[in-house]
């Protein structure tokens, strides 16, 4: 009988400890979840990716060359919701708006790019403390408003330099973040568009106009 009591008491203690641990995890997850909003600043690197063919189309091998890129000022902000499932794992869904003073590397022209995107990231945190480091990675979909891209798209039937023009497509998001306390967060990240803005092709090469965004952001979580 005494052995049964000891087993029962030990089991009850273990259950209580596990329950307390789960409640603590739920409390941390609840504290880290919520609406966030904030500004960001950075740069958009524009470049032309040349794929030169060593042989006749379509069997020629390609050697890749990147001409001098341009570095353009990026300003904007984001708003969204982050939801943690425990102290270490969470998701965040958010929208981003950016303005870029975009200098084209392949034509003598500068234009204002307005970029909008919706994004979903997986977030990993490394501590249960209020101040903690973390990493994120995810996908997004972006739209770009640009007079130059719009004019190029309209002119495609009449020009030879470009075969197609895009102003929307998929993004890859990668970065790190630091929570200073329950409400203040700093992050540094890279947004890599999978799509190209413009594409041109002839018998010897294919080249695409692309960009990637590097930014530093502050988020306030409510």
Image: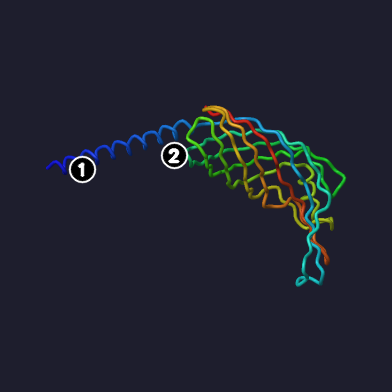
Q: Farthest residue in the front direction?
A: 2
Q: Quadrant of residue 44?
A: top right
| Residue that carries the numbered disc 2 in the rendered image | 86
Secondary structure found at label 2: loop
Q: Quadrant of residue 207?
A: bottom right
Task: Using the image, tell me which numbered label, if any, was put on residue 165.
Answer: none
Report x, y in % for residue 153: 76, 50
Image quarter of the N terminus: top left
Location of residue 125 with respect to 194 vertically, above or below: above
Q: For the point 16% across and 40% down, which residue is it?
A: 5
Q: Nearer the viewer, residue 32 or 18?
A: 18
Secondary structure found at label 1: helix
Q: For the point 83% across and 47% down, which residue is it?
A: 105
Which callout, 1 or 2, points to the residue nearer the camera? 1
Q: Nearer the viewer, residue 21 or 153?
A: 21
- The mark nearer the N terminus, 1 or 2, is 1
Q: Farthest residue in the left direction?
A: 1
Task: Using the image, tell me which numbered label, if any, was put on residue 7.
Answer: 1
């Amino acid at each position: 009988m005494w052995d049964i009591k000891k087993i029962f008491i030990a089991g009850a203690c273990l259950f209580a400890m596990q329950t307390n641990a789960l409640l603590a995890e739920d409390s941390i997850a609840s504290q880290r979840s919520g609406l966030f909003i904030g500004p960001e600043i950075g740069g958009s690197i524009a470049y032309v990716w040349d794929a030169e063919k060593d042989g006749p189309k379509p069997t020629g091998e390609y050697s890749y060359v990147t001409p001098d890129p341009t570095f353009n000022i990026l300003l904007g902000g984001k708003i969204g919701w982050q939801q943690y499932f425990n102290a270490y794992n969470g998701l965040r869904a958010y929208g981003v708006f950016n303005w870029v003073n975009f200098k084209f590397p392949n034509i003598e022209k500068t234009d204002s790019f307005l970029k909008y995107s919706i994004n979903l990231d997986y977030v990993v945190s490394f501590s249960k403390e209020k101040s903690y480091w973390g990493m994120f990675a995810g996908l997004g979909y972006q739209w770009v408003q640009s007079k130059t891209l719009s004019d190029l798209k309209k002119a495609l039937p009449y020009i030879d330099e470009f075969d197609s023009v895009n102003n929307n497509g998929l993004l890859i998001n990668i970065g790190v973040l630091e929570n200073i306390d329950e409400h203040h967060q700093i992050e540094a990240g890279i947004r890599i568009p999978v799509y190209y803005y413009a594409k041109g092709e002839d018998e010897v090469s294919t080249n695409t106009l692309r960009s990637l965004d590097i930014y530093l952001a502050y988020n306030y979580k409510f």
